[in-house]
Image: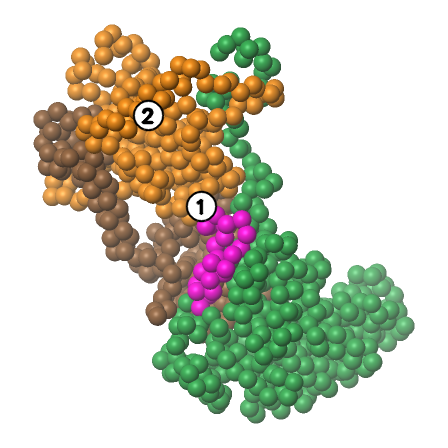
Chain colours: A brown, B green, C orange
Amino acid sequence: MDSFLHTLDPAEFALRCAASEGDAAYLLYVVPSDQSAALIEELRLELLAMDVAVSAVGPRTTDALLRAAETDGANALLVDATGFDAEDWRLLDRRRSSLQRRAVTVLVTTAEHFADSMRHAPNLMSWLGAEVFAFPGLETQQGKQARDREQRLLALRAWSGLTDDAILEAAAAKTLPRDPEYAEWLVLLGRGDLLDA
Amino acid sequence: MDTFERSLPCPTSAPSAILLGMSQAVPQTAVADDRLTHFRRLREQLAPARDPSETLALEVYVERSGSCARRIATELLLAPGSSHVLIGGIGSGKTTELLAVQKALAGSPDTLALYLDVSVQHDIAKMKPGVVVAQAALAIADWVRGIGLEGHSNEVRWSLARIRDFALGYVATEDYPEQDYPITPGILEPVKAAEATSMFASRIGEVLTSLGALAPRFVILVDGLDRMTNIERFEEVVRNDISALSKLGLGVVLVGPLRALYGIDRALLDLFDRFHYQPWLDVRGDAGAGAFLRELLTRRVPSGTFEDSAVDSLVASSGGVLRDLLALAQSACVEAYLHGGETVGVEHVQASIDAFGRKQMQGLRGEELQILRRLVLLGEFVHTSEDDLGLLMTRRVLEYRGTDERPRYVVHPTIVPFVQ
Amino acid sequence: MRDLSDLQAYTLGRSVTWSGSAKQLLRELRNVLRTASNARALVTKPQDVLTYVRQIEPRQNALRPQLQALGVAHEAIAIVGGDKNFGRSAELKHFRRRDGAWFDFSLTLRESTGTLELLAYDFEIRLPPGYGAPFVRFDLNLPEHRNEERELRSHAHFGSDDLLVPAPVMKPDELLKLFIYGLQKERNYGIQRMDRSPSDFERDWLAETCELMNGVRLPGGERS
């Protein structure tokens, strides 16, 4: 049985954070290092959209985190921990009493540094409980989106009895019916340019 | 609209809503039974990472049979100047027990327990002898000021001022990272640990002597030192600070590092009058343990929140680690919210257990996995190496002590499926 | 359609353009549904709200880079809620109200820098028995090519795919709120409303419709 972390996309992870709002809660999100900045920003926007007042702390210093934990009044603190090494985690473990706050703290880090934290910050990590998840990765997401798209195209073809090529031809000839299903069909085929045809 | 409808009184919803047949206004604010609010509240009540003093204040503290807190408090009442060390694994409830000692002693008319978390004001990696005495002195000084006795006498006033000056100069801070500089105007000079300890101890003694019967019997509850990884430094602190406090007649209860239980480090425990062990609870081997954990869990939430089978599953999978029990329960609440449950069922608990186990598996090296497999398959675990100790420290391996005090080791239940 | 151009103009009179991004709209729609789920107006789980409402990525095709270079790629977006459900099967993914009504939707938009333009949508809700119509669907078609062939671009269907009635253009969140909180059977104005028994006309109509549906194979697939 593989022991990889369960994956959640940023919106799903943000929903878990929002469900934990109002309390001392600690969550951790494992992300690829080259996408960390973009994913942290996406998490921030998702949380804001869920009406969670969120502050982002970065980059990457334990001092910044400890200061923010003491002074920041936001309901959620989003911490870029991608640069925390073993020594940083040891420090945070020793100083974890200073991280106690009646709000949500989200640590975003890489797989490698998460492994460090489990080794060097066992007390702090015990506060996470089961709230550790990983970003699924772009390839996985793209694969899922492709399957979703093809399922919808299949349904459209079955309903109309037409092929993709027939739709494109009709659109180009300005004979495509104007029903919203055909609009979606063109978009899914990547031919939104024919919507105004 | 027909005549009948035209004669109706104007409803509170907007006219357009009537025409559209809206039977309820779009909610602008959360209603009392909103699912999100309900589950957030449940999570809050189960928070393992909240300040333990809140647990006691909320009266959800459940006393374990043979509780360390009761034993320690009783012994301090009988021997007020005694020193105690409390050791237990991560999440075993040590801080809560310490605060329970404080609460128990609050009932005594002449004893006062002061709680210190040394790690809050001081980086314990830079721990050195004298720091605990300094923080104890500051705590006593705060108490004196708090009840308005600072002006009791010139000796008290002077001693409190000196305590503040020595503490600010001595306790390592960002501004004074590695040197020990007491604040003497215009002059800076390094101070040795023994001198600093002596200075603080003397000041404490002067305050207590001057206050006489006005001062209670102080007990200093020292938390945070369990995070020290350098056992030699821990020993220095104990030999220097705890000894100094004991000589002043102060009671001391100190939470020590788990590794002090093992191997040659165990001799440290003899530096205290009493050693108390706060083990994890052997849920499988001790029926009372299961009942205790059930009550600990169900006392915090309204009746019916968890299905019975869910509680059983939580208790079993916690491995008797209090913090893990609460953390698993919290996650199960989130699962119930996300998946539309009105109560927390076993399927929500299973999802929580699975995620918890996966987390616990991260960062394990091959050698460590071998140790875990051997324990699962053969029941063998002898902690001789740093890897073995590391697995105990990180709760991948749990140690239980039976009535015969012999240890029994198991792999944390949440990771067993991944190790097998 | 003969001489309904004024009506057409009226139903399309609202702006179908607003500031924002597709991502923002996605979050907003999820929020509307999640708020309803939290309030138990919907029995759909919060987790399902998140996964059912999504933006579908178009296929990458060889023409795309050229179209983008020419500035005519027209970043068209599809946002959907639930599965494509021509057969009205409750087995496919949908959103469900606590009274048993259930719905799904799809919309296409154009996204330019900071602006969204609504191009087309279909939002359909299936109602429990006794609600007067088995389904209600709001459609916004693409604009017609030629004036003389213009049907009502924005319209609604009440239990029939053939009959359509004019409807104003609505924003997606408005349609969702209508589906969640509106189109309800009970109307309570603080006065006990007497149940109105169906008339003989309605009873006969329903009975003859059942006979027709059971005895006649409808042409052209499941939706007539």
Mark 1 vs mark 2: tell me if same chain. yes
Q: Position of residue B32 (x, y in %)?
A: 61, 40
- Where residue B173 sits, quadrant-wise, is bottom right
Q: Which residue is mark 2?
A: C210
Which chain is mark 2 on?
A: C
Question: At 58% from the left edge and 16% from the top edge, which residue is drawn?
Answer: B10
Q: Residues within 10 Å of mark 1 (few under 14, many from 20)?
A: many
Q: Which mark is residue C45?
A: 1
Q: Position of residue B248 (x, y in %)?
A: 79, 81
User: Which residue corresponds to the image point at 30% horizontal and 13% vertical from the top-left?
Assistant: C9
Of B115 and C187, which appears nearest the observer? C187
Query: Which stretch appears magenta?
Result: B335-357
The residue that appears at 42% across and 53% down in the rendered structure is A13
Which of the image's four quarters has the C terminus of chain B?
bottom left
Q: Secondary structure at mark 2?
A: helix
Residue B340 is covered by the magenta coloring: yes
- Residue B254 sits above or below residue B165 on the image: below
Secondary-structure class at tag 1:
loop
Majority SS type along the magenta span: helix
Give the side of residue B396 with respect to residue B101, left or right.
left
- What is the x, y in percent for residue B142? 76, 65
Establish if B392 lies above or below C171: below
- In the visual, does A77 lie left or right of B33? left
Q: Amino acid at mark 1?
A: Lys
Instruction: Mark 1 vs mark 2: give the one in front.
Output: 2
| Disc nearer the start of the sequence (1/2) | 1
A185 and A159: which one is in front?
A159
Residue B217 visible in the snapshot: yes
- Looking at the rendered structure, the kind of residue marked 2 is Cys
Q: Residues within 10 Å of mark 2 (few under 14, many from 20)?
A: few
Measured as percent of width and height from the top left, residue B368 is found at 41, 81
